[in-house]
Amino acid sequence: MFRLASQIEAILYLKGQPLDLAVIAECAGCDRDAAETAMIELMDDYTHRDSALEVVETPQGYTLQLRASFQALIEKMIPPEIGTGALRTLAAIAIKGSISQTDLVELRGSGAYQHVQELVEVGFVRKRRQHGSRSSLLQVTDKFHRTYELNDLPIPQLATIASETTDEIDGVDFTTKSA
């Protein structure tokens, strides 16, 4: 039989969200006092453990979470959330291979300026000034390929798609101007 603290650890892990002590006790099949004692034991265990995880009490309840010192790892490993418009703009840049910002704005509308800025900030798009032109050249970065795991996408297929002049590729209309 597992100790109650281990059961509570499993409950916190499986639920993946802060839980009130009453809910924890109900899930563990024990009374509130026993759950509280086991919770203190579990928190103490994590305090003395060399672990990336910790058990903390928040205003919403107790939770098993990654220690704050690993925040940089979270930002590196979990893709940032970007809006639908920016995601469509990113798809257009990826499909075209490289595209001038002027051509992208013609394709996606003036909202593309903000999308490009957002995509550069999160590291998915590289923006380079073109010689002899006022427009910048846009390309996806290695971070984009690592995040979306498209490194194995056949390059000839991208070249074929990039040479198409239509604004609709595989049923996706890139002229949509939604943000």
Image (cartoon, helix red, strand yellow):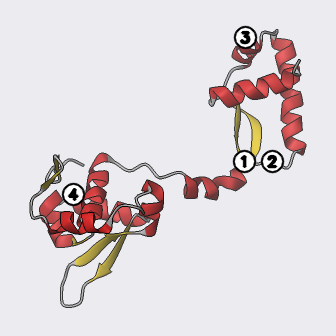
Residue picked out by circle 3: 26
What amino acid is labelled 4 in the image?
Gly
**Tag 1, which secondary structure?**
loop
Residue picked out by circle 4: 111
The reply to whether the C-beta atoms of the residues labelled 3 and 1 are less than 8 Å apart is no
On the image, the x and y values in percent for residue 127 come to 33, 75
In 3D space, how far apart are the residues under numbered discs 4 and 3 (Cα atoms)? 50 Å
Determine the image quadrant of residue 119: bottom left
Mark 3 or mark 1, earlier in chain: 3
Residue picked out by circle 2: 51
Residue sitting nearer the eye, 137 or 1: 1
**Tag 2, which secondary structure?**
loop
| Dot 4 alpha-carbon crowd within 10 angstroms: few under 14, some 14 to 19, many 20 or more | some
Residue at 19 percent across and 66 percent down: it is: 160
On the image, the x and y values in percent for residue 63 come to 70, 32
What amino acid is labelled 1 in the image?
Arg
